Amino acid sequence: MPADPYETARQAQRLAVTRRRRRRADHPAPVNAASQNDQAGSPTQRQGRRAEARAARYLETHGVRILAANLRCRAGEIDLVARENTLLLFIEVRERRHPGFGGAAASVNRAKQTRLIRAARHFLPGIVRRHFNGQPPACRFDVVAFDTDRPRWIRDAFHT
């Protein structure tokens, strides 16, 4: 007796979604993808991309290896994913020109932290497979804040 065609279709759809998620997690956007598109987007988006590039350069001078940039999913976006020795870093980059609303670091509020944590959980399996040989590393959430032209690196900015 043949299988229920509706059940067969549901299984195929679930399999396609799973494959898509794995493919995205296994192939994060290259670090220089934003630099290829410097003129695209609003002035605020262009400012954000420049801040992310400056933050990446700053972190690299301090021995951090950038693994990916601008990872996006439904849950949110992660500006930079990096490795510092055996630690996996999820880094949020913030820039504020005027301190009137509490500065760049203060803008990473609880709602933003929740989105970052959800996005990190989404991308974690693929990053672990690709960069850590399948062995889950210790993870940390950092913030690089630009209130002036000088970056301020806040290590372990918040916890899950």
Image (tube, grey):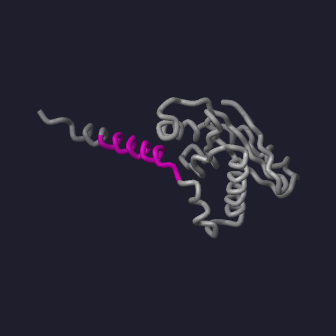
Q: What secondary structure is the stretch in magenta mostly built from? A: helix
Q: Is residue 17 a member of the stretch shown in magenta?
A: yes
Extreme residue toward the left, this view: 1
Q: In the rendering, at what x and y percent does residue 18 appear?
A: 39, 41
Residue at position x 61%, y 29% in the image: 138
Q: In the rendering, at what x and y percent does residue 156 appear?
A: 73, 34
Query: Would you place residue 151 above or below residue 85 in this image?
Result: below
Left or right? Give the position of 75 relative to 47.
left
User: Observer-nearest residue: 56 or 119?
Assistant: 56
User: Observer-nearest residue: 106 or 152?
Assistant: 152
Q: In the rendering, at what x and y percent does residue 100 appear?
A: 88, 52
Left or right? Give the position of 85 relative to 133.
right
Extreme residue toward the bottom, this view: 39
From which residue to which does the magenta span run?
Answer: 12-29
Residue 122 seen = no
Query: Would you place residue 62 above or below residue 140 in this image?
Result: below
Residue at position x 48%, y 41% in the image: 130
Query: Count of labels shown?
Result: 0
Quadrant of the frame with the N terminus = top left
Q: Is residue 16 a member of the stretch shown in magenta?
A: yes
Residue at position x 52%, y 40% in the image: 131
Residue at position x 63%, y 35% in the image: 85
Quadrant of the frame with the C terminus = top right
Q: In the rendering, at what x and y percent does residue 137 appear?
A: 57, 30
Query: Would you place residue 138 above or below residue 95 in this image?
Result: above
Residue 11 seen = yes
Left or right? Give the position of 97 relative to 33.
right
